[in-house]
Amino acid sequence: MLMSFLISDMLIKHVFLANTPYIRPNLGTYIADKTSSIFGKKQNSIASSLSPQDQSNLLYKATENIPYKALGGGVYAKEYKDIKIIEYRSGEVVWVEYTFNVDGKQAKVRVPKGQTPPPKSLVEKIY
Amino acid sequence: MYIGPFYFDTKEVFLILAMLIIGLAIAFGWNIWWFDKKTLLTLLILILVTKGLLPSIHNEAFFILAIVALFLTLYLPVFQVILFYFVSFLLFRLLRII
């Protein structure tokens, strides 16, 4: 009886539409999609069982022979299949310093060149 | 018991009586606490029809199935209870329980 309850629950959720006797019209493709998503989740769960450091090591190892492309302003990127790596090299970023007057004190904010500076209200909130 | 040329077991007579009572409840608007009258009537008709397919000796498992199905009507939608009933009946027959 427990098995039949589980079978009926599965049929109600996946085969029939909204508790009616009508069978899902796209049943074949629906089952195929569900099966492939289950297998996809299993593969992802195997990968996510690794620590973050091991995961990033794996990604770097997979792309070690691919050179970075310079996107400008200290930003470099490379791509391999579904892996995309973006690297920010802070030593190469060109900074522009802005000075704000907050409550009589000077507050300096560094922003990468080309980006708009933050509004004064935001700087006042931070400081 | 014989009604004309037809033979009815005691349990079938009780099922028919229950159906008649529910039919009267629907006709006269009597209240049955928590249960839905139409659901009960539908399920009793199914139970009676499937009872006719069984040999008279295998009653206990069928009786438990009927009670569980009636109880599930309090919690599950009607169609799911009917599916559960048919799947259980099929599995019982395949496993030769009934």
Image (cartoon, coloured by chain):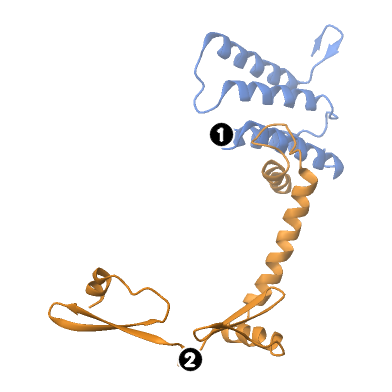
Chain colours: A orange, B blue
Q: Is residue A17 visible?
A: yes
Which residue is at 69% across, 90% downward?
Answer: A64
Q: Is residue B11 visible?
A: no
Q: Which mark is residue A35?
A: none
Question: The disc numbered 1 marks a residue on which chain?
Answer: B
Q: Position of residue B9 (x, y in %)?
A: 78, 20
Mark 2–mark 1 contact, CB under 8 Å? Answer: no
- Count the marks: 2
Which residue is at 62% across, 24% downward?
Answer: B40
Left/right of residue B92 with respect to residue A124 in the rendered view: right
Q: Secondary structure at mark 2?
A: helix
Q: Position of residue A110 (x, y in %)?
A: 34, 84
The image quarter containing residue A44 is bottom right
- The residue nearer to you, when weighing A5 against B63, is A5
Residue at mark 2 to residue at mark 1: CA–CA distance: 69 Å
* Label 2 in the same subunit as label 1: no
- The residue nearer to you, when weighing B85 against A7, is A7
- The residue nearer to you, when weighing A76 against A54, is A76
Q: Position of residue B49 (x, y in %)?
A: 78, 23
* Residue on which the image places disc 2: A92
* Residue on which the image places disc 1: B74
Q: Dot 2: few (<14), some (14–19), or many (≥20) neighbours within 10 Å? A: few
Left/right of residue A91 with respect to residue A54 in the rendered view: left
Q: Residue furthest bottom?
A: A91
Q: Residue furthest top?
A: B4
What amino acid does circle 2 point to?
Glu
Q: Residue furthest left?
A: A104
Q: Position of residue A92 (x, y in %)?
A: 48, 91
Which residue is at 72% across, 36% downward?
Answer: B83
